[in-house]
Amino acid sequence: DAGITQSPRHKVTETGTPVTLRCHQTENHRYMYWYRQDPGHGLRLIHYSYGVKDTDKGEVSDGYSVSRSKTEDFLLTLESATSSQTSVYFCAISGGDRGLPGELFFGEGSRLTVL
Amino acid sequence: KQEVTQIPAALSVPEGENLVLNCSFTDSAIYNLQWFRQDPGKGLTSLLLIQSSQREQTSGRLNASLDKSSGRSTLYIAASQPGDSATYLCAVRPGDDKIIFGKGTRLHILP
């Protein structure tokens, strides 16, 4: 465990509602990532951060926004959730003191269902 | 655009056999390559990380190799056990830090 927690772990919401997922890390990792995992598509990068207030888009960023106001927390927001955003969302971190240089560590995932 | 491919998508082998999982990538300009294991309903666990300057890494019964020039990596598992059953994913880290994953190989070890 590389000191990474995701919340909530499970959420059911309705189409059109806003949703925020939180990733919290305790080991001063520079990089933080949000991925979604879907059958047939594997893990796809949504957004990532390379420092406080420094973020960039991944391959499936439409419909998602992120914020990183402090090193420990990386928030993923769905402004208006759609059924196509039903997925398992994973946060990942790297660039900290733990592990090898560039090694990526994952959280346990957040399962989101949009009805 | 970097693409990562893992073939086969699924593999079943009898317990005790040695096996090789494959990962290929299209752009050789990578910073590192990492292998993960994922059990059903769980997150990803890091198995081995190979830096771009390295050719292989070993951990217990696992050995990962990297050939950047050909865009290939292999994960060798020796003396397979039923507990090795899981999905194995590889990921490459290019220079822009947008880490890209293959879709994984689902491994089933037959007792």
Image (cartoon, coloured by chain):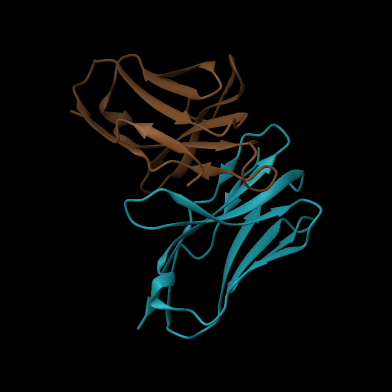
Q: Is A63 or A108 nearer to us in this picture?
A: A108
Please report the residue visible at 54 percent of the width from the left and 51 percent of the height from the top. B102
Residue B26 in view, yes or no: no
- In the picture, one chain is cyan; tell me its letter: B
Q: Residue B22 appears in which quarter of the rendering?
A: bottom right
Location of residue A39 in the rendering, given as x and y in whole percent from the top left corner: 36, 48
In the rendered view, tell whether residue A73 sits above or below residue B50. above
Location of residue A113 in the rendering, given as x and y in whole percent from the top left corner: 23, 33
The answer to whether residue A79 is left or right of residue B76 is: left
Q: Residue A75 appears in which quarter of the rendering?
A: top left
The answer to whether residue A77 is left or right of residue B95 is: left
In the rendered view, tell whether residue B57 sits above or below residue B45. below
- In the picture, one chain is brown; tell me its letter: A
For the N terminus of chain B, give its image quadrant: top right
Location of residue B84 in the rendering, given as x and y in whole percent from the top left corner: 44, 70
Please report the residue visible at 77 percent of the width from the left and 55 percent of the height from the top. B68
For the C terminus of chain B, give its image quadrant: bottom left
In the rendered view, tell whether residue A34 sits above or below residue A57. below
Q: How many marks?
A: 0
Q: Is A73 or B95 nearer to us in this picture?
A: A73
The answer to whether residue B100 is left or right of residue A67 is: right
Please report the residue visible at 65 percent of the width from the left and 41 percent of the height from the top. B2
The answer to whether residue A37 is left or right of residue A86 is: right
Location of residue A92 in the rendering, given as x and y in whole percent from the top left corner: 51, 37
Residue B90 in view, yes or no: yes
Please report the residue visible at 38 percent of the width from the left and 58 percent of the height from the top. B39
